[in-house]
Amino acid sequence: MRIGIGFDSHRFMEGRRLVLGGVEIPFERGLWGHSDADVLCHAIIDSIIGALGLGDIGRHYPDTDERWKDASSIGLLKETIGLMRMSGYDILWIDSVVIAEEPKIGPFIDSMKEEISKAGIPRERINIKAKTAEGMGLIGRGEGMAAQAVCLLVRLGEPN
């Protein structure tokens, strides 16, 4: 078994759509980034890459590479899951948290699990939590949001 932790954060900006866990969330601002800036998917990707011992998300999907400009993070997650399986592993569990003052994302968690499962992680192996920063720091001031994820991988063929 292997465990990995991932983190991502992006600042808000006008004129972009807000995508979390592959779901477009109605909100007046989106997240600034090279891809669709989906902090939840990025944190999950980062945790998988970390568990594989292959660096971090920036090494595999650098923001200097035009291939990833406006890319769907669900697509990047699907690609990462392919890499994980080629390395001989499968996901046992993903635990994640999105930290934001607004918008409230609780009503969208089931839809996020559904979209993430389409990338190749069984829905019943995904947990998503929503937290605030209680008004502290840049997230608390509503300047952006962050996400963290932990994944547990098992070598293919090993008993769970």
Image: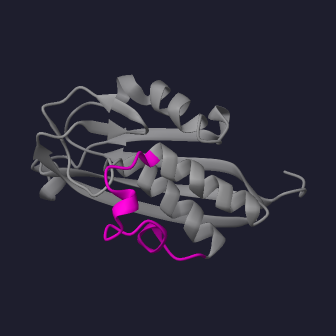
Percent across and percent down for residue 66 are 34, 63
In the image, residue 25 above or below residue 94? above
**The residue stretch that appears in magenta:** 54-73
Query: Where on the picture, by quarter, is residue 62?
Result: bottom left
Percent across and percent down for residue 10 are 24, 56
User: Residue at 44% across / 29% down in the picture?
Assistant: 109
User: Residue at 52% across / 77% down in the picture?
Assistant: 55
Q: Residue furthest top?
A: 107
Q: Residue furthest front?
A: 66
Percent across and percent down for residue 2 are 70, 67
User: Residue at 79% across / 63% down in the picture?
Assistant: 88
Say which of 28 and 69 sits in front: 69
Residue 17 lies in the magenta stretch: no
- How many labels, in total? 0
Say which of 122 and 71 sits in front: 71
Say which of 22 and 70 sits in front: 70
Residue 63 lies in the magenta stretch: yes
Magenta stretch prevailing secondary structure: loop
Screen quadrant of the N terminus: bottom right
Query: Where on the picture, by quarter, is residue 7?
Result: bottom left
Percent across and percent down for residue 24 are 32, 30
In the image, residue 30 above or below residue 9? above
Q: Is residue 133 left or right of residue 24?
A: left
